[in-house]
């Protein structure tokens, strides 16, 4: 016989029903929020179009919302190199004419007169062996380092601390020198260019508040340095793709040939830099101002030639490209005329020599 339910058992059952009802109601309230998250508006599609450098800079500055801090302006390039090879590694330092807009703290390892010169030049941290011991204990309140050659053996103690952070003085970067004063002034507005394991070079070229002319000048300095360190044997295109963006904004792709046009060689813009000294007819770079006047037959890059033809056609300018069917027909007619003249000349020479009679098939064919 089933025992009668006591008051306590009824209370327990009622509490269970109430908790079940509460869980159902909470799930009903959460479901609309989950639906909103699932079907929320898709993210904007990235812009895959190619723009000239000045236009890409303008779009990156205008189409990115304003932030509560000073955004940086970045340049990214994908180079046609293989960093696994020793001669394809790119690591250098370049000085930007307008700086990066970022305050950099410089540490100088020097003693005696060199230390005094570094302090006068504006170095934030200067010291000798005692500074090495402080870094070993955990001091890292600086961004870049410079050292005199005499101090390099003493830096072996902190090589494992500075090396992974990219702050170890290096001969390749020119941060091991006796002329520390000039190097301190140089590093105030310098950036380090280093290719990663897949060939990307990323650099800060300034702040979003910079003018377009200042950003173009800084980018020109970076592109020039990258072009100077082009490894031997690298095939075209050297720059596969490139883009500019703000720190938290969308990126806009730049025409690689337009970017390389801003590289300078010996102070002159590389408008028509030839492939080598013995081939003056091949053009590698094209100045954006000469898109409508450059001789397309002298271009080495087929992709650049195709791009310029399409650009001229879109602007309503003459492309300078003949019609292919007419060209083929004209060449066929020219070959026919030349063959006919050749046969006639051969028949006349044979008849004059008496090798073939006047009414022979050769003479008839030539006629």
Image (cartoon, grey):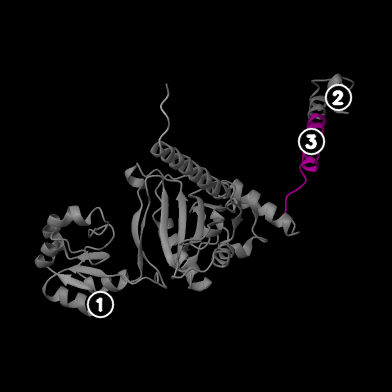
Q: CA distance from mark 2 to mark 3?
A: 19 Å
Looking at the image, can residue 270 be seen? yes
The residue tagged 1 is 122
Looking at the image, can residue 265 be seen? no
- Location of residue 95 (image quadrant): bottom left
Above or below for 254 versus 28: below
Do labels 2 and 3 touch, CB within 8 Å?
A: no
- Pointer 3: residues within 10 angstroms few (<14), some, or many (20+)? few
- Location of residue 121 (image quadrant): bottom left
The residue mark sitting in front, 1 or 3, is 1
Q: Position of residue 123 (x, y in %)?
A: 23, 74
The residue tagged 3 is 332
- Pointer 1: residues within 10 angstroms few (<14), some, or many (20+)? some
Q: Is residue 33 left or right of residue 297?
A: left
Residue 337 within the magenta-colored segment of the rendering: yes
Above or below for 185 versus 258: below
Mark 2 lies on a secondary structure that is: helix
The residue tagged 2 is 365
- The structure residue drawn at horizontal position 57% and vertical position 65%, both measured from the top left corner, is 54
Do labels 1 and 3 touch, CB within 8 Å?
A: no
Report the label total. 3
Q: Is residue 89 left or right of residue 28?
A: left
Q: Position of residue 83 (x, y in %)?
A: 37, 45
The magenta stretch is: 319-345
Disc nearer the start of the sequence (2/3): 3
Assign the magenta stretch its main secondary structure.
helix
């Amino acid at each position: 016989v089933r025992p009668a339910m006591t008051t306590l058992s009824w209370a327990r059952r009622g509490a269970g029903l109430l908790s079940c009802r509460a869980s159902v109601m909470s799930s009903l309230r959460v479901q609309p929020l989950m639906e909103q998250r699932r079907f929320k508006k898709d993210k904007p599609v990235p812009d895959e179009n190619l723009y000239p450098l000045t236009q890409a800079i303008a779009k990156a500055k205008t189409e990115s919302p304003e932030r509560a801090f000073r955004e940086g302006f970045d340049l990214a390039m994908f180079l046609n190199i293989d960093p696994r090879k020793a001669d394809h590694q790119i690591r250098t330092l370049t000085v930007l004419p307008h700086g990066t807009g970022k305050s950099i703290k410089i540490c100088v390892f020097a003693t005696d007169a060199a230390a005094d010169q570094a302090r006068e030049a504006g170095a934030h941290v200067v010291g000798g062996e005692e500074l090495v011991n402080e870094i070993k204990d955990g001091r890292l309140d600086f961004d870049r380092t410079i050292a005199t050659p005499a101090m390099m053996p003493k830096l072996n103690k902190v090589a494992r601390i500075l090396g992974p952070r990219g702050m170890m003085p290096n001969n390749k970067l020119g941060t091991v020198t006796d002329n520390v004063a000039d190097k301190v002034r140089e590093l105030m507005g310098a950036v380090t260019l280093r290719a990663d394991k897949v060939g990307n070079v990323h650099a800060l070229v300034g702040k979003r508040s910079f003018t377009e002319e200042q950003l173009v000048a800084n980018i020109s300095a970076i592109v020039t340095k990258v072009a100077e360190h082009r490894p031997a044997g690298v095939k075209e295109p050297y720059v596969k793709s490139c883009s500019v963006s703000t720190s938290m904004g969308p990126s806009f792709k730049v025409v690689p040939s337009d970017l390389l046009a801003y590289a300078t060689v010996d102070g002159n813009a590389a408008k028509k830099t030839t492939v080598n000294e013995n081939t003056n007819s091949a053009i590698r770079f094209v100045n954006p101002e000469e898109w409508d006047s450059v001789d397309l037959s002298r271009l080495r890059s087929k992709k650049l030639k195709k791009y310029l033809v399409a650009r001229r056609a879109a602007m309503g300018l003459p492309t300078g490209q003949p019609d292919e069917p007419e060209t083929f027909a004209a060449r066929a007619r020219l070959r026919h005329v030349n063959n006919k003249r050749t046969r006639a000349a051969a028949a006349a020479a044979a008849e004059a020599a008496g090798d073939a009679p006047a009414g022979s098939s050769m003479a008839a064919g030539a006629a």
